[in-house]
Image (cartoon, rainbow, N blue to C red):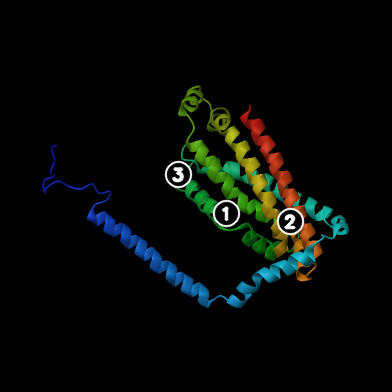
């Protein structure tokens, strides 16, 4: 029986070399130290008595909230309608301003890459960076509480979302139809209408439906800061500790979101089957 001896210079297989292994372990060590420091800061700022007592409080609130106050539903139809209108009108306004802004921002359609495009990019980033609730706080302070403030807040939040996704789609279009239309002597507006827009139309519809669905969810909480919708009823019920009303409002919000999700899913399925 032959025995094969390995020479001293035979190298063992290793997944990482020594330098890479040290870097990986150093990263894990740094992450562990950061976790411990963060946990210490959180622990010092946390009242652990309330945390340990949370299950009892949650059970007490759930017991008070059940059963929901069904007769209160008559007070919710108008706020639900306002919530639907805030999302729908806000989305429509966002489309009205977002689509032209997308054409002004895209590298292949903007009339000025050094003036107009940077200005539009700043607005797109600002719109997407600020949460809907913060926009609502600002619009309520300027316009006063009500549905109008909610519509404007949803619009300001959604314009940047529309413009970003649409201008990215415009920059990725096939340039062959654009060059063909341009070769016929078409104006820039005609090129956008007949060569660019047909290529991004399906994406636009999908983005519009998706954003409307998201805005339904956002609109349900804008009333917490006075921007209209069913959130106003939720805020007043929470302030008065009317838990049966709170449970009914939460159920109504859940059903509204399910309804909007069903509609958006049907529209998206219809678009994809075309």
Residue at 79% from the left image edge and 58% from the top image edge: 248
Q: Which mark is residue 127?
A: 1
Vertical arrangement, residue 102 with respect to residue 49, above or below: above
Q: Secondary structure at mark 1?
A: helix
Q: Residue furthest front?
A: 1
Vertical arrangement, residue 178 with respect to residue 13, above or below: above
Residues under labels 2 and 3: Cα distance?
Answer: 35 Å
- Point out the tag, 2 or 3, that comes first from the N-terminus: 3
Q: Secondary structure at mark 3?
A: loop
Q: Would you say residue 229 is visible in this rendering?
A: no
* Coordinates of residue 157 in the picture (x, y in percent): 61, 53
- Point out the tag, 1 or 3, that comes first from the N-terminus: 3
18 and 213: which is toward the camera: 18
Instruction: Give the labeled residue for mark 2.
Output: 148
Q: Callout 3 environment at 10 Å: few (<14), some (14 to 19), or many (20+)? A: some
Kindly check if marks 1 and 3 are in contact, taking CB atoms under 8 A apart as contact: no
Report whether 164 appears left or right of 4: right
* Coordinates of residue 6 in the picture (x, y in percent): 13, 45
* Coordinates of residue 226 in the picture (x, y in percent): 73, 63
Kindly check if marks 2 and 3 are in contact, taking CB atoms under 8 A apart as contact: no
- Split into 4 quadrants, where in the image is the N terminus? top left
Report whether 115 appears left or right of 88: left
Q: Secondary structure at mark 2?
A: helix
Q: Quadrant of residue 199?
A: top right
Instruction: Give the labeled residue for mark 3.
Output: 113
Residues under labels 2 and 1: Cα distance?
Answer: 18 Å
Q: Would you say residue 105 is visible in this rendering?
A: yes
Residues under labels 1 and 3: Cα distance?
Answer: 20 Å
101 and 165: which is toward the camera: 165
Q: Quadrant of residue 55?
A: bottom right
Q: Callout 1 environment at 10 Å: few (<14), some (14 to 19), or many (20+)? A: many
């Amino acid at each position: 029986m032959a025995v094969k001896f390995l020479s001293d210079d035979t190298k063992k297989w290793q997944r990482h070399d020594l330098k890479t292994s040290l870097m990986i372990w150093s990263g894990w060590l740094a992450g562990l130290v950061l976790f411990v420091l963060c946990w210490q800061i959180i622990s010092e700022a946390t009242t652990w008595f309330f945390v340990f007592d949370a299950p009892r409080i949650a059970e007490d609130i759930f017991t008070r909230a059940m059963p929901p106050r069904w007769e209160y539903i008559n007070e919710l139809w108008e706020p639900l309608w306002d919530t639907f209108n805030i999302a729908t009108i806000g989305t429509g306004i966002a489309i009205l301003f977002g689509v032209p802004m997308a054409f002004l921002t895209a590298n292949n359609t903007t009339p000025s890459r050094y003036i107009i495009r940077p200005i539009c990019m700043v607005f797109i980033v600002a719109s997407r960076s600020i949460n809907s609730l913060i926009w609502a706080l600002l619009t309520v302070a300027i316009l006063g509480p009500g549905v109008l403030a909610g519509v404007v807040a949803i619009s300001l939040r959604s314009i940047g979302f529309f413009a970003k996704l649409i201008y990215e789609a415009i920059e990725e279009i096939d340039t062959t139809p654009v060059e063909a239309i341009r070769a016929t002597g078409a104006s820039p507006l005609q090129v956008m209408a007949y060569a660019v827009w047909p290529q991004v139309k399906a994406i636009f519809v999908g983005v519009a439906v998706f954003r409307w669905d998201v805005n339904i969810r956002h609109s349900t909480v804008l009333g917490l800061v006075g921007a209209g919708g069913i959130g106003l009823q939720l805020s007043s019920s929470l302030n008065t500790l009317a838990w049966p009303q709170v449970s009914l409002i939460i159920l109504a919000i859940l059903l509204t979101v399910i309804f909007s999700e069903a509609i958006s899913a049907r529209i998206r399925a219809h678009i994809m089957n075309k």
